[in-house]
Image (cartoon, rainbow, N blue to C red):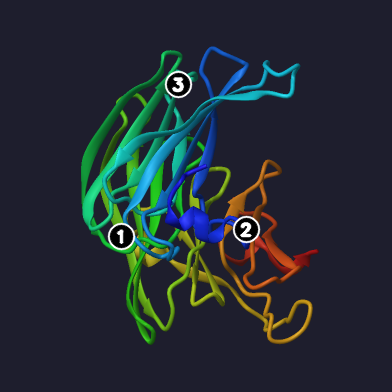
Amino acid sequence: LSPDPQTTQWCNTTGVTSHESSVIIPMPGDNNKYYLFHHGGSQADPYSYPLICYYSVIDISLNSGLGSVIQKNQILIQDGLNRGFASCKHSNGRDWWIVILKHSSDIIYKILLTDQGISNVSTQSLGTFHFRNEGQKQFSPDGKKFAYRYIDGTIGNVNNEVRVFDFDRCSGTFSNPRIVSWTSNYGSLGLAFSSNSKYLYTVSDFDTIYQINTDTSNIQASMQAVAINDGYYSPFPPQQSDFWTMYLAANGKITISSGGGVVDLHYINYPDSGGLACDIQQHALH
């Protein structure tokens, strides 16, 4: 998959290191077909640009039920992209939106998947320039909001932003940009919405988790720290069980990964609750 120098460099070691570098979407109206959107880089360095968006198609009814790839490595967008996909179901409850940001621009690509396949690829100017977007991108569970992490700067003076937009699931239009910003020593990746689509959680310096209320008129003022890393090592020093990426699981809890071979993860027990009542359990998931 994704035939390019980056994939060649990393396929036999850790795998491609980009977060959210692929997404599998069921083909609307066909229970047997799935679209796999994936990307890779034009250089071996996993932090290089540009990235190319590919898609492949899998039919699980073929090969005596084992499934078969019927299209592979089809280039969809070749325009210097940032890492990471986000996806959201269309307002008709059948089709899907898949989005990816263009590097060094304010452009977002919008892919519409229907029962006819990829029916449209369009762009929109978000009005907020993004250069090195290293953080996660997420739609809210109700599909009405979209957010992504943005970081820029150097170690010791990193500009962090969480950029939040309204999203129209019918037209695929982003609007009403709001920005929460702060400075820190390091950049971080994590971002996740609560299941009620009200609260947004993010990470700073790999050691602090913030909660943001996206339903208020002043989301900057709503930002509050709800967890500070307690310094636990897993399984032993120097592998600290810090805060990395986030994922809203089917049980309504948000799981938080750690870096560097750490085996004890974290979770937010009640993400729909404001403040410390969200109950973050550090290194509690082995």
- Looking at the picture, tell me which residue is in the foreground, 252 or 41: 41
The percent position of residue 152, horizontal first and vertical second, equals 31, 71
* Circles 1 and 3: CB atoms closer than 8 Å: no
The percent position of residue 2, horizontal first and vertical second, equals 47, 44
How far apart are labels 2 and 1 at the CA level? 39 Å
* Three-letter code for the amino acid on which mark 3 is drawn: Asp
Residue at 62% x, 70% y: name it. Answer: 259
Q: Is residue 128 visible?
A: no
Name the element at disc 2: loop
Q: Label for residue 12?
A: 2
- Report the mark closest to the observer, 2 or 3: 2
Q: Quadrant of residue 44?
A: bottom left
The residue under label 3 is: 95
**Which of marks 1 and 2 precedes in the sequence?**
2
* Three-letter code for the amino acid on which mark 2 is drawn: Asn
In the displayed structure, 47 sits above or below 182; it is above
- Looking at the picture, tell me which residue is in the foreground, 7 or 23: 7
Residue 202 in the figure: left or right of residue 260: left
Q: Quadrant of residue 120?
A: top left
Residue at 43% x, 56% y: name it. Answer: 5
Q: Is residue 34 visible?
A: yes
* Three-letter code for the amino acid on which mark 1 is drawn: Ile
The residue under label 1 is: 179
In the displayed structure, 280 sits above or below 252; it is below
In the displayed structure, 167 sits above or below 218; it is above
- Report the mark closest to the observer, 1 or 3: 3
Sort mark 3 into few (<14), some (14-19) or many (20+) by Cα contacts within 10 Å: many
In the displayed structure, 216 sits above or below 141; it is below
How far apart are labels 1 and 3 at the CA level? 29 Å
Residue 247 in the figure: left or right of residue 286: left
The percent position of residue 1, horizontal first and vertical second, equals 52, 42
The percent position of residue 189, horizontal first and vertical second, equals 48, 64
